[in-house]
Amino acid sequence: MTSIAYQFTGTVMTDNQLDSRLETLEIRASHQEAAIDELTRTLLSQEKRIAELAETIKRLEVQLRAMTPSPIDAQLDEPPPHY
C-alpha cells in the first residue's frame, strides 16, 4: 500500500491516520445517532404521558364540580326570609 501524506490545517497525516480519524468520526456519529433516537423515544413517551395526565385532570375537574354544590344552587334551596 502506498503511503500518501495529506496536509490539513498544518498537520501532515498518513493514510493510516486518516483511516483512524475517519473511523473515530464514524463511531462518534453512530453514538450520537443512537442518543438522538433514545431522546426521541423518551420525548414521545413523555408527550403521551402528559396527554394522559391532562385528560385525567379534566375528568377529575368534572367529578369535583359534580360533588361541590354551587353557591347559586344553595341559595335556590333555602327558603326565602320571612318579613
Image (tube, rainbow, N blue to C red):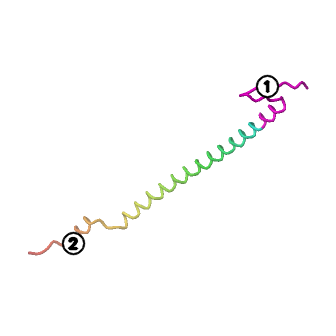
Residue at horizontal 37 percent and vertical 64 percent from the top: 66
Vertical placement of residue 24 versus 73, above or below: above
For this rendering, which residue is in front, 29 or 22?
22
Residue corresponding to mark 1: 6
Q: Position of residue 74 (x, y in %)?
A: 25, 69
Q: Which mark is residue 78?
A: 2
For disc 1, the neighbor class at 10 Å (few under 14, some 14 to 19, many from 20) is few
Vertical placement of residue 13 versus 39, above or below: above
Residue at horizontal 39 percent and vertical 64 percent from the top: 64
Q: Is residue 10 magenta?
A: yes
For this rendering, which residue is in front, 4 or 9?
9
For this rendering, which residue is in front, 58 or 39?
39
Tell me the amino acid under the disc marked 1.
Tyr
For this rendering, which residue is in front, 18 or 75?
18
| The furthest residue to the right | 1
Q: Position of residue 56 (x, y in %)?
A: 48, 58
Dot 2 falls on a residue whose secondary structure is loop
Give the extent of the magenta segment. 1-23
Task: Give the label, 2 or 1, closer to the camera.
Answer: 1
Q: Position of residue 25 (x, y in %)?
A: 74, 37
| Displayed quadrant of residue 62 | bottom left
- Whether tag 2 and tag 1 are in contact, CB under 8 A, the answer is no
User: Does residue 25 appear to the left or right of 61 in the view shown?
Assistant: right
Residue at horizontal 91 percent and vertical 26 percent from the top: 1
Tell me the amino acid under the disc marked 2.
Glu
Q: Earlier in the sequence, mark 2 or mark 1?
A: 1
